[in-house]
Image: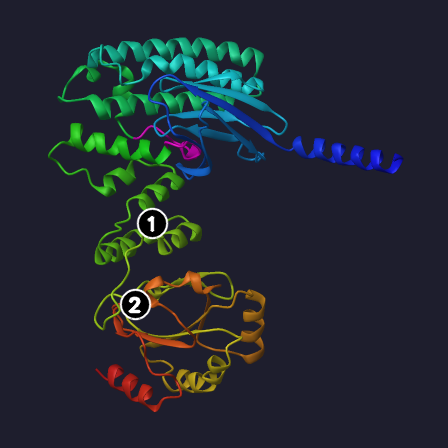
């Protein structure tokens, strides 16, 4: 009996510690036009990403239990139209109400959520759907909120100086977003009341954000797109507002990179290729280049001779990213293989002979490994003294889906301009390959 009581005591203690790792969000919806579900959202590169979702019970209740991430404590409840920003900490319980399309925090759980709720109430008058007010009435209302919030932030700074930097960022970006959303949706005529606003004249000189804090907000990229679309429609009007002009307004490399990635054409493959070849060199770092190359929405290439081939891009043994575009002006003979593939390894001696025979000519031999184990791949290259260009894809899934790679090895041939010569080229051991290469190189 004593042992049983001790066992139950241990379970309760462990359970208590375990629960302290979580933050709990309890909510209830009421009023008209209730949502049928509620999403909990995180932010990634200025875009909302669903973290969890739940249906709303018949009585209107919903709940989330989350292990908060210390480096990114902001989470957002989303009803399909509006975000409710919350600061989550382990062991905190937050109670949220939703009534008539508005969130309100009933139990904040910590001081940061209390301040966020104060700000949410202050900016409520800025909502652009107040049909009883004229378009021009928004601008003095906006300036009034700005004045009030500046006074409030001074008081917050006196009492909560450790949090004032984050809160100022949130307030300034929310104000910018509300302003842009209002004029973007409501303006009908050029040279209207917004021209009298000092804030309007200030932000329309060039995009006002000079750091990457915008990318921490769920509306970040939408704000950037709305800002540029507004300027095209109501400032430049019939004059083209080019991509180069827009990028020139972005002094922050991260914002510039995210905008380039957001504008990638996803319906026409040839437009995508032209865009990639022009803008990829402008991306500041390999992580952005990889995101462009492996974009899920990327249109697929046509696997026919003469059609543009994908600009395959993977790291070499030193970690440097290399792409097919880096070898423009040369034929590219590509070998997709793996160290665990016996037929692949059987082709290596023949491939090495070709590399020696065509050395110094306008052709490169590129081997792309789909080994999951990078060290095994690197060790094999070193021990076997493999030549040519050695790249590591890391997995089948990293290859373009249109290749439909059913097995390896797979050999392909791309011309100097990046177009397919053959999507299923002969193997190195096939004597026909040497004839084909000699004929191509003699042209």
Helix, strand or loop for disc 2:
loop
Which label belongs to residue 176?
none
**Would you say 366 lies left or right of 22 here?**
left
Front residue of 273/182: it is 182
Does the magenta portion include 209?
A: yes
Front residue of 442/31: it is 31
Name the residue rendered at 53%, 34% in the picture.
72
Q: Which residue is mark 2?
A: 328
Q: Residues within 10 Å of mark 1 (few under 14, many from 20)?
A: some
Residue reaching furthest to the bottom: 431
Q: Quadrant of the C terminus?
A: bottom left
- For residue 131, above or below residue 265: above
Q: Residue 75's x, y, as percent?
A: 49, 30
Q: Which residue is mark 1?
A: 282
Q: Quadrant of the N terminus?
A: top right
For the record, the magenta segment spans 207-219
> Which secondary structure is most common in the magenta stretch?
loop
Q: Residue 331's x, y, as percent?
A: 30, 75
Q: Residue 253's x, y, as percent?
A: 39, 41
Q: Residue 293's x, y, as percent?
A: 36, 56
Q: Earlier in the sequence, mark 1 or mark 2?
A: 1
**Would you say 60 lies left or right of 233 here?**
right
């Amino acid at each position: 009996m004593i042992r049983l009581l001790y066992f139950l005591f241990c379970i309760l203690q462990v359970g208590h510690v375990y629960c302290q790792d979580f933050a709990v969000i309890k909510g209830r919806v009421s009023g008209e036009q209730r949502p049928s579900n509620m999403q909990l959202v995180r932010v990634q590169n200025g875009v909302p990403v669903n973290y969890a979702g739940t249906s709303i019970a018949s009585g209107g209740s919903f709940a989330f239990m989350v292990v908060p991430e210390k480096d990114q404590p902001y989470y957002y409840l989303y009803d399909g139209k509006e975000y409710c920003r919350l600061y989550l900490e382990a062991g905190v319980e937050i109670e949220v109400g939703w009534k008539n399309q508005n969130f309100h925090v009933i139990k904040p759980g910590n001081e940061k959520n209390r301040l966020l709720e104060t700000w949410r109430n202050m900016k409520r008058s800025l909502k652009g759907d107040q049909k009883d007010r004229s378009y021009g009435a928004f601008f003095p209302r906006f300036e009034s909120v700005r004045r009030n919030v500046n006074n409030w932030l001074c008081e917050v700074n006196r009492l909560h100086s450790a949090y004032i930097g984050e809160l100022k960022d949130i307030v300034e970006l929310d104000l910018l977003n509300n302003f842009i959303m209002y004029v973007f949706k409501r303006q009908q005529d050029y040279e209207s009341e917004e021209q009298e606003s000092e804030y309007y004249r200030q932000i329309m000189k060039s995009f006002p954000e000079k750091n990457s804090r915008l990318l921490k907000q769920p509306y970040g990229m939408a704000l950037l797109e709305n800002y540029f679309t507004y300027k095209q429609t109501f400032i430049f009007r019939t004059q083209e507002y080019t991509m180069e002009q827009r990028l020139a307004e972005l002094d922050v490399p991260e914002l510039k990179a995210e905008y380039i990635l957001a504008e990638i054409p996803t319906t026409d493959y040839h437009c995508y290729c032209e865009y990639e070849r022009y803008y990829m060199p402008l991306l500041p770092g390999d992580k952005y280049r990889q995101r462009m190359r492996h974009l899920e929405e990327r249109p697929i290439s046509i696997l026919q001779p003469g059609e543009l081939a994908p600009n395959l891009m993977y790291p070499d043994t030193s970690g440097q990213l290399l792409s097919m575009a880096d070898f423009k002006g040369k034929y590219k003979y590509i070998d997709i293989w793996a160290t665990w593939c016996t037929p692949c390894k059987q082709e290596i001696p023949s491939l090495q002979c070709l590399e020696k025979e065509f050395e110094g000519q306008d052709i490169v031999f590129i081997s792309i490994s789909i080994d999951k184990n990078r060290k095994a791949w690197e060790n094999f290259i070193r021990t076997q003294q493999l030549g040519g260009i050695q790249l590591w894809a890391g997995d089948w899934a990293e290859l373009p889906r249109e290749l439909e790679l059913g097995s390896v090895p797979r050999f392909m041939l791309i011309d100097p301009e990046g177009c397919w010569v053959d999507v299923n080229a002969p193997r190195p051991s096939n004597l026909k390959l040497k004839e084909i290469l000699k004929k191509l190189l003699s042209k």
